[in-house]
């Protein structure tokens, strides 16, 4: 993953996280907010397919690069969202490594499929984060499956839009990937 | 591989440390939070302002329609309220009239005031009722819940005109219950006020201002003990057998709406009637 692209994706994630941090205050009722960091990680993970043996493609999918990206993205998510520092950093780090492995088997195209994948990933990621938090904090009480499903549904609804924005960022900042058809 | 393992272990350690001491922030944490906090504040202000603007705009879009609907509802409710208050007022008047009718134990007929004639000073000088024909005859007493109104002067088809007790042509035999004085109530000339005077009240009778004046039942027209008015002025001259007593009528002729006409003239008063008549009854039962 090129540094420029990583910076672009992190910037989008940062703005999205800022927006999501104020939405619960502004919106009426208690609507769940989408997990923007997860969507950015999902996009980054799904676009790191190791197609061919070009040096740029291989470089984009290196495990260390993916883990580092997940680490920074998670760190920002923790700070902006108010979660214990390291929680999302660890979770997204692991998720991106998993996605890197799965990316070769997955071809995500179309808004519907993106939403389905986003919903499933959000549920799994939510359970993973709960597990990580329970590991780090024995007194932690799980918020409940309905809350998790609500956030997953909201994440799935927002996924097409977020992916569209991220594709636009990729189109500008990731010339190698665009040339090789690696974008979604 | 070692790098990847390090990248996994590092956040794990940070997580454990963060859970143990959540308030301890690194300089990088502080820097990022310092950058984030104003942005969050600005974003919240922007979103809140947008939401408020939108909600106000939506509210304004519906305001005109709501205003028209509420104005229409308001008019309808006002009309209903007016109608109900008129009905209430009429109901209360009729209730009082019914009470009087039950008290009289005489045969009466209710009538509604359909016309009034007023003096240049806006004092009622003649009242027209919506009841006439064969059952109503001149001379029949006309009563209101407050007291005596006058008597029928003439009938014109289904209507009848009332000679008010303040008319100079009116003459009613009255009694002042406190002193037992008797006299004849006559209307006073003058179109600017409702006044009448009691004639033939003996000079030695100690009449006071505020004394009640009622019908005596003599004369064969009016049932006895019906309120007529109150004494408002007494004038004793240096000569003569009688004193001048001015009376203000009990009835406000300007507010008359419904009245009772006593259809059958009561028989002459019976000295023992007080003992035989039921408690609170005024006048006599007149069989038809």
Image: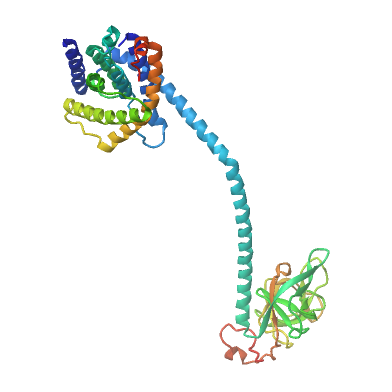
Q: In this rendering, would B23 be left or right of B188?
A: left
Residue with the most extreme front position: A52
Q: Is residue A84 above or below residue B111?
A: above
Dividing the picture into quadrants, the one containing residue B79 is bottom right
Front-most of residues B73 and B139 = B73
Question: In this picture, is A18 found above or below B182?
Answer: above
Picture quarter containing residue A72?
Answer: top left
Quarter of image, res B63: top right
Spot occupied by residue A134 in the image (x, y as percentages of width and height)? 18, 29
Between B163 and A8, which is closer to the camera in this rendering?
A: A8
Percent of width and height locating residue A104: 25, 20
**Residue B245 visible to the viewer:** no
Residue A140 image point, x, y percent: 20, 31
* Residue B162 sits above or below residue B30 on the image: below
Kindly give the residue lying farthest to the top in the view shown: A55
Regarding residue B52, the answer to whether it shows in the image is yes
Q: Quadrant of the C terminus of chain A?
A: top left
Marks counted in the figure total 0
Residue B184, position as x, y percentages in the image? 76, 81
Q: Indicate the colouring scheme.
A: rainbow
**Residue at screen point 25% across, 27% down:** A125
Position of the N terminus of chain A, as image quadrant, is top left
Q: Residue at x 61, y 46 (%)?
A: B68
Q: Is residue B108 left or right of residue A103?
A: right
Left or right for A19, reference B234: left
Camera-side residue of A158 and B132? A158
Residue shown at 18%/18% (left/top)? B13
> Is residue B172 positioned above or below A51 on the image?
below
């Amino acid at each position: 993953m090129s540094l420029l692209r990583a910076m672009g994706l992190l910037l989008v994630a940062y703005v999205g996280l800022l927006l999501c941090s104020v939405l619960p205050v502004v919106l009426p009722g208690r609507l769940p907010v989408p997990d923007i960091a997860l969507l950015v990680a999902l996009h980054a993970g799904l676009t790191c397919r190791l197609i061919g043996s070009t040096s740029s493609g291989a470089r984009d999918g290196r495990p260390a690069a993916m883990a580092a990206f997940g680490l920074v993205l998670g760190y920002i998510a923790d700070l902006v969202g108010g979660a214990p520092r390291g929680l999302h950093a660890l979770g997204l780090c692991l998720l991106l490594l998993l996605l890197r492995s799965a990316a070769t088997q997955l071809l995500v195209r179309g808004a519907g499929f993106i939403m389905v994948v986003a919903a499933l990933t959000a549920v799994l990621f939510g359970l993973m984060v709960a597990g990580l938090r329970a590991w780090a904090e024995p007194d932690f009480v799980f918020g409940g499956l309905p809350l998790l499903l609500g956030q997953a549904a909201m994440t799935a609804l927002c996924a097409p839009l977020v992916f569209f924005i991220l594709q636009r960022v990729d189109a500008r900042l990731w010339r190698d990937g665009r040339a090789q058809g690696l974008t979604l | 591989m070692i790098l990847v393992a390090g990248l996994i272990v590092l956040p794990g350690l940070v997580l454990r440390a963060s859970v143990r001491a959540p308030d301890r922030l690194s300089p990088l944490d502080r820097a990022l939070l310092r950058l984030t906090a104003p942005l969050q504040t600005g974003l919240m202000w922007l979103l809140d302002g947008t939401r408020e603007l939108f909600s106000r705009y939506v509210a304004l879009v519906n305001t005109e329609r709501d205003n028209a609907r509420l104005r229409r509802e308001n008019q309808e409710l006002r009309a209903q309220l007016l109608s109900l208050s008129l009905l209430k007022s009429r109901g209360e008047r009729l209730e009082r009239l019914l009470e009087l009718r039950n008290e009289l134990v005489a045969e009466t007929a209710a009538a509604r005031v359909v016309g009034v004639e007023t003096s240049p000073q806006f004092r009622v000088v003649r009242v027209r009722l919506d009841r006439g024909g064969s059952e109503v005859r001149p001379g029949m007493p006309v009563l209101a819940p407050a007291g005596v109104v006058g008597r029928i002067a003439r009938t014109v088809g289904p209507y009848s005109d009332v000679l008010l007790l303040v008319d100079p042509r009116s003459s009613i035999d009255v009694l002042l219950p406190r002193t037992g004085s008797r006299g004849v109530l006559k209307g006073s000339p003058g179109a600017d006020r409702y006044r009448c005077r009691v004639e033939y009240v003996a000079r030695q009778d100690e009449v006071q201002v505020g004394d009640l004046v009622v019908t005596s039942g003599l004369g064969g027209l009016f049932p006895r003990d019906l309120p007529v008015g109150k004494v408002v002025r007494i004038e004793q001259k240096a000569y003569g057998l009688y004193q001048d007593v001015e009376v203000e009528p009990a009835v406000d002729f300007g507010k008359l709406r419904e009245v009772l006409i006593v259809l059958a003239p009561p028989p002459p008063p019976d000295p023992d009637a007080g003992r035989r008549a039921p408690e609170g009854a005024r006048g006599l039962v007149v069989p038809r």
